[in-house]
Amino acid sequence: VNLLRRWVGDPILVGLALLLTLFGVAMIYSAGVLNVPSPVVERAWLRQLQWLVVALVAFAVTIRIPPRWIEWGALPAYLFGVVALGAALAVGTGAGPAESVGRWLVLGPIRFQPSEVAKIAAILGLARYLASREVPPTNLKDLVLPSLLVGVPLGLVVLQPDLGTALAFVGVLFAVLYWAGTPPLHLFLLASPGLALILSFDTRVWSAYFVGLLVAVYFLRFRLYLVESVAVVLGNLAAGTIALPVWSSLADYQKNRLLVFLDPGMDPRGAGWNLIQSKVAIGSGGLFGKGFTQGTQKRLDFLPEQHTDFIFSVVGEELGFVGVAVVLLLFGALLYRLVQMAERAPDPFAGLVLFGIFGVWLVHIFINTGMTVGIVPITGIPLPFLSYGGTFLVTCWVLVGLAVRMAREE
Amino acid sequence: MKSAHPAARRARAQGAVLILGALLLILLASFFRSQVVRGTAWALQADSNRLRVLPVPAPRGTIFDRYGEVIADNVPSYSLSLFPAPVDSVASVLARLQPLLHLSDERVEGLLETFRSNRRQPLLVKMNLADEEVAVMEERRADFPGVFLEMRPRRRYRGGEALGHVLGYLGEVSAGELESPSFEGYERGMIVGKDGIERQYERLLQGSHGIRFAEVDAVGRIVGSFQGQAARPALPGQDLHLHLDLELQRYIHEIFPPGMRGAVVALDVEDGGVLALYSAPSFDPGEFVGGISRQRWQELNEDPDEPLYNKAVMGRYPPASTWKLASAAIALEAGVIQPEERMPIPCYGSYTFEGRTARCHRAEGHGHQNLAGAIATSCNVYFYQMGIRVGLDRLVEEGHRLGFGDRCGIDLPREMVGIFPESRDYWQRTWGYRAAENEVMTMAIGHGPNDQTPLRMAQFYLALARDGDAPAPRILRDEGAEIEPAWAMDLSPESLEALRDGLRAVTRPGGTAFLRAALQHWDIIGKTGTARVFAHRPAHAWFSGMAGRWGGPAEIVVVVILEEGESGSAAAAPIAAKAADFHLRRKYGIPVDTIQTLWEHNVAGIPAPWAWNRDAITLPELPEAVADEELPESYDPSLLQGPRPPATGPRPRPVPPGGSLVQGERPNR
């Protein structure tokens, strides 16, 4: 056990991650079993296995990096991530179904998604900044810089445009701020403009919300600076009123996805197709599923992107609710383990990094699985460890390595 | 930043776990609701997602002739259809199919037009694919999403041109037909009868199509077998047994003078069943199966000989002398003449009544004649006087009662009504003058406003053969139906015998049709007729007669019209005689011979002593009539209802085969 501990650091976390990855390879294999075979999807599981080897090497390297290096390297890494994102926007290429999108960077033989690197960079950069502060942020002004730290890469990712990954940055921001000791009230106030943005699609709902917010700010007047109150109110007002211009600036597919979230039946072959097919596949899986590789919706190619973003629909169709519950509980255990590790973290930086990782994965898992069953809008966001994708798998394992490394520092 | 107090860290960790737990619970609850609570509904949707309902075409009923020979049946064939899809994708698939299936540009355009008019049902692209085409499509199935091959029964007609008019032809049901009540329950794309028996008994023959499910993938490609499983098998249409004799029909087609227009109707005296119904020139209904080319359809339509018109039931000709039997029957029934009575004024070649002088066809005249003699010589002067006795009003009224202004009610869709005045008003209405009493002279010899179909004349002679009553001629043998006379003449046996004696004299030594019509085994009697419609064109030749065993009742009635055939005795009579001989020989089991009439014996140099001295020859005992093999089933009367043509009006145009079946033809809407 000690040997194992020396080699992998935290056997529970690494074991869970490995279990999920191998399960993912199996599901990717199943996703390739189609009635009318597609050569790309059919052999994806083999490539995923190759990527797993790369990922494990990356993991092994990561857990051997001295923690000091990580702390020192945090800011340079952050800057590199932001520059890479900028470069991707300028010279990046698209791939697969998203060909017109600047998501990929090619460096010699390596082709990667800088947004994945930027996720790690944002976690490290934010953790580094907050760890260097004397006291936890207690007012909204203290939140401006952290928000900017995350906001820059987030904005670049939104420009790509990649709504799903952008949400992961939001997850990082709130998780890290939370662990840093920011009062929940302030976190809510920070989030309130975003909430106002979402609610502004219905003027009446937004008005009610805004009145409620004003009342709340009034009662909280002794706990907030005047500037804060004004900023929150103005921010909400702005979010509520700029929503429409923002809406019209969204790409058509983004608009469609949001609309389809509200009414999936509106265009079965267009934007709603993915959601409806996913729901049909999952729903028809029933309690025990149709059996491994036996999913009819998947086999007949009704499921879109069944080996990447919608891999969880294959789980739902073939393994049923039982399989879904097991996978979700495994994810839950993984995240719970991260919280445990953060609680026992030897220093504030380690805890903040661990919570950053927690935030990223929580957003990924909740949004990805939630969209397959139709409780959140469809955003192109992969499921950690399960979805096919080289850069993403390597990133996940680097994050595992980072978590193990930070937690183990003595 | 200093490390937070352990208690604070614990509290934050608990908060994080709480949030994590809440989110997990939301997810689990959503999946539980979707998969367990509403799982069945989604499973159903999954099936409907991947299963497409396809119709399984039912084979049309087989049609048998009176001897159980197959007239029309089905053979399997492949057809190719497209699932409904956006118009653009249908267009692109069609464009790629075009070279593989050898479709013309016009055809592709027509198909797109058809598809645009109804985008929700599969589009039938091509029927009766060649084997190579089937092989190519099977091989390249993955390249053609939404395309499916299916086995469809294909109609096969054994009679070819011999039976074109009676059987009619098939075509895709048209939009107009779908709206009519007689096509209730039909769906677009179905193949229906357009004319003839196929149209008349459409409901019986159609059957009902079955349903099968085919598993398809997301882009509509059928996965696995093209055939799929049948969830409900197709119900084949009912078989039909007809009175028709396929061989007789073929024989008539063979002996009919090539290149001539005309018609032949042969009826069974026993029940009014139609033994043969032929119209020349004819067409092959097989040409319509699977779509007739636009060019061929045009050819058939524009042919001056009008091959698409069934002249036996749609052609209307002045009956001329063959109608003299009708006026004689009316006179006898009215009691104004006696069979043996001679007319007071002998025939001197002409007759004058009310200032109008009408001539006989023989300038020297026929002298004093009784009824039989007048029929034998076709003496006009006798019939002028007879008609005057009957009177115009009575002649017209009685003629109407005998159905000359009405349909026979044969089970064919487009029978025409004969032209016959219903009263004196007819003259007023049509030509604007009051009919004088002397019009009766013209009417009595079968001229004037009197045009009859060959079928109508056949029905009248059928009444003569049946001692006065005339059932509606039927093509379908329906054992359940009773034979009801459409009308009846009240004639004494002597009167009937006198009429038949007149007919007999025509074909006996000395009669006009003796040489051309006399037969060795059978007693054939009949009346010739010559109807000149246009002064400078040859006259139409009629022969209406009946034949049976010597000394027995007549068993078959045959009517022949030969347009511009010039002579009833030389042109029309031999066709009737040969057809009757053919039928009776088959009926009594005597080997069929092509040398049948006296004329043919003479030409072939075969002695025919039977023609001159019948009493000297003892004919071998004839075998009893050969019993029919099987009795056909009886039919659901509600399904026997054919289309009802309008009572009056112009001659209907041929029904186009419709839909996408006429290649390049626009669907009729």
Image (cartoon, rainbow, N blue to C red):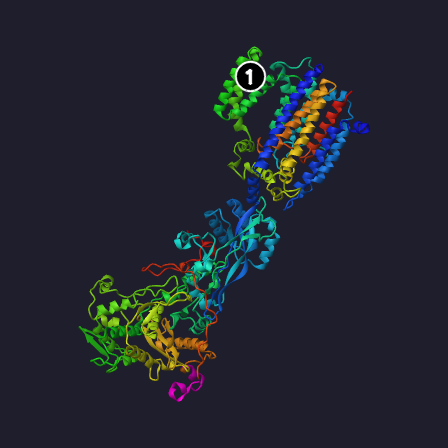
Residue at the bottom extreme of this rendering: B616
Tell me the quarter of the picture where residue A384 sits.
top right
Badge 1 local density, few (<14 within 10 Å), some, or many (20+)? Answer: many
Q: Position of residue B303 (x, y in %)?
A: 41, 64
Residue at mark 1: A232
Tell me the quarter of the picture where residue B560 sits.
bottom left
**Residue B185: in magenta span:** no
Amino acid tagged 1: Val
**A291 left or right of B207?**
right
Instruction: State the extent of the magenta-drawn residues as a range.
Output: B599-620
Image quarter in which the N terminus of chain A is found: top right
In the foreground, A374 or B505: A374
Residue B168 higher or lower than A316, as above or below: below
Residue at the right extreme of this rendering: A3
**A125 left or right of B156?**
right
Q: Circle 1 — which element?
A: helix
**Residue shown at 21% from the left, 66% from the top:** B435
Q: Position of residue B199 (x, y in %)?
A: 42, 60
- Taking the image as drawn, is residue A257 in sight? yes
Image quarter in which the C terminus of chain A is found: top right
- Taking the image as drawn, is residue A161 in sight? no
